[in-house]
Image (cartoon, grey):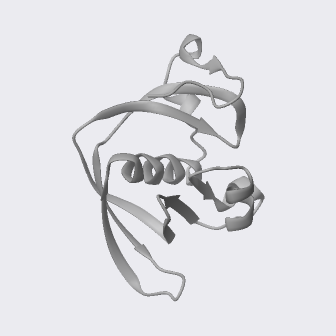
Amino acid sequence: MLTTMRSAHGLGLAAPQVGEPLALVIIEVEGRLLQLANPVLVRASGGQVGWEGCLSVPGRVARVLRAAEVIVRAQDLAGNLVRVRRSGLEARAILHEIDHLTGRLYVDLVPAEEVVLVEGDGPSS
């Protein structure tokens, strides 16, 4: 999963995106790798709007409202229970990837006319 995510220049990936029926997500923001099994959102607060794209929806982006801070309960890859608190881009990425585990994509959160085609690096926030 990590190789797939990095080769696509992504910030995160959920196991179902690569055909694995697991509740597993990985997120890497600014060199900080987070691997969560069976993640459960405990609390979300605040709000932030930012651009999102997805390996499952190539060539498109949209501005999406997400929580600014999250607390998630999960297991690490060794099976230990962990509680993670993140904000900003990491919070956005965690919520984006957890959505994949329930079959929801960022394009489901915005009106279709707000999803835009991109070339190159796309819009910046």
- Camera-side residue of 121 and 116: 121
**Side of 76 where 7 appears, left or right:** right
The image shows residue 39 at horizontal and vertical percentages of 45, 65
The answer to whether residue 1 of the structure is visible from this angle is no
Which residue is located at x 53 percent, y 35 percent? 52
Q: Compared with residue 4, is residue 122 higher up or lower down, i.e. above or below?
A: above
Which residue is located at x 61 percent, y 45 percent? 103
The image shows residue 74 at horizontal and vertical percentages of 42, 72
- Camera-side residue of 60 and 36: 60
Which residue is located at x 30 percent, y 54 percent? 70
The image shows residue 3 at horizontal and vertical percentages of 73, 65
- Camera-side residue of 29 and 62: 29
The answer to whether residue 42 of the structure is visible from this angle is yes
Q: Compared with residue 112, is residue 21 higher up or lower down, i.e. above or below?
A: below
The image shows residue 40 at horizontal and vertical percentages of 40, 62
Q: Residue furthest left?
A: 46
**Side of 80 where 12 appears, left or right:** right
Q: How many marks?
A: 0
